[in-house]
Amino acid sequence: MSYEDEASATPTGDAARVDSARHPASMHIAFFLENLGGGGRQKVLLIIAGELAARGHRVEVLVCKAEGPMLDQLPAGIELTTLDRAPLPLARLYALRADPAGLSALFRPVLVTHRPSETLAWLPGLVKYLRGAKPDALLTGTPYMNVEAWLACRMADSGCRLVLTEHNDLSQGHPLGSGFHARYLPALCHRAYLEADAIVTVSRGLATELAERTRIPEDRITVIYNPVVTPDLVQKSLEPLDHPWFAPELPPVILGAGRLGRAKDFLTLVSAFARVRKLRPVRLVILGAGKGKKDKPDKRETEIRELADRLGVSADMDLQGFVANPFPFMKQAAVFAVSSRYEGFCNVIVEAMACGTPVVSTDCPSGPSEILQNGQYGPLVPVGDDAALADAIIRLLDSPTDPEILRSRAGFFTVSRAVDGYERILSGRNAAG
């Protein structure tokens, strides 16, 4: 039984607390990240790292670049280490020396490509770290970084346990999803992942998709749902919200959240909002930033604003940008809406449910239908269908889901449950306990 089966079957309470108390001996665990950006993957991995540190393990976060909005939000007890960067030709030489028998798999995606991984230049630095620090376990979480971690472990021969994770649906925009990378990377991932000590995905759908794309047996993959509900989430949701649209006598607010990229498809959410706005007073707030540079506007943000202008709803839409604490927004919103084209899991659905807020989501791969149990806890609508999304929003405004039911479901995605699973895997114990 995969770990997430056990987690879903076990109610919160004494049983979970007893299981959480059976921790293995203290380990030295390293997390390999490109930076401390505000994405969902970095957030999840830092939550896991923080809980492991709280359980008495020595935890280091290794970064290629010590930058990003989460730099000042590192959990207590975590060491931050910036890896050395090497010239790209040296990094490629390290990759070949680590796996000379894998020349054919390495050739296109690593050795000769004009579009190498953004983190490949840090491979020699990771090898140097592993040889010197000798951690008990190394965990990382994107296809290329997973491959680089595997190569580093081979080169360093440090004996550390390697845990590779996948957090994002393998759709367009994912290295395994389309284009040059998807043509050559699956064979390399097949080679790397099968030598890892464990492979973890954050949803069943993603596990199935990863197995199909890389030809890895699905029974080699463990599913651990994301550690979304933190002990302080409810407390954070009660903090004052300094926004003029959330007063009780004002129109209800629809809330969206996520990076302003193609995956979240906020254009569909704006179109759905415009449909609802024609029928009743309502407002839209979107939390999240794009990838634009400081000296030029983000392309996706510009597209969203231009669509709102064309539809005549700009005055009732607010793009807030990155928000360190989104939970007061979630708690006070009337409906939380997810318009994504694809997700690996979708943390924000669970966060909104933990705040007691009704949720509607597109039925995209891979996480929303699993979280909402095929619509039991919130309506699911087709991807890209703004009319269906608008209808579902209206239904929730008229008849919101019981907050206690939502909070109860969110209780299946706690930090304690998820980190129990990671702790078992990192220590070499059976994932199902």
Image (tube, rainbow, N blue to C red):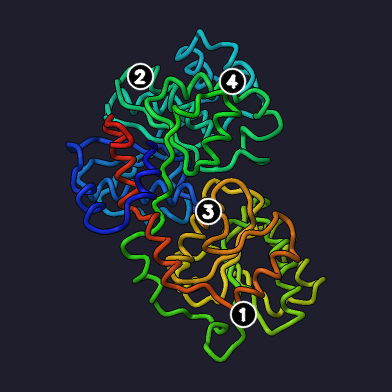
Residue 162 in the image: above or below residue 239:
above
Decide if residue 29 is on the left or right side of residue 24: right
Where disc 3 sits, the SS reads: loop
In this rendering, which labeled residue sits more in front, label 4 or label 1?
Answer: 1
Q: CA distance from mark 4 to mark 2?
A: 23 Å
Quarter of the picture holding the C terminus = top left
What amino acid type should be assigned to the residue bearing mark 1? Asp
Mark 1 — residue? Answer: 398
In this rendering, which labeled residue sits more in front, label 3 or label 2?
Answer: 3
* Residue nearest the viewer, comparing 333 with 75: 333
Indicate which disc, 3 or 2, sits on the residue closer to the N terminus. Answer: 2
Indicate which disc, 2 or 1, sits on the residue closer to the N terminus. Answer: 2
Q: CA distance from mark 3 to mark 2?
A: 35 Å
Considering every residue shown, the one lying at the far bottom of the view is 249
Residue 190 in the image: above or below residue 73:
above
Label annotation for residue 346: 3
Mark 2 — residue? Answer: 156
Indicate which disc, 4 or 1, sits on the residue closer to the N terminus. Answer: 4
Indicate which disc, 3 or 1, sits on the residue closer to the N terminus. Answer: 3
Would you call the spot at circle 2 few (<14 residues within 10 Å), some (14-19), or many (20 or more)?
Answer: many
Q: CA distance from mark 2 to mark 1?
A: 60 Å
Mark 4 — residue? Answer: 187
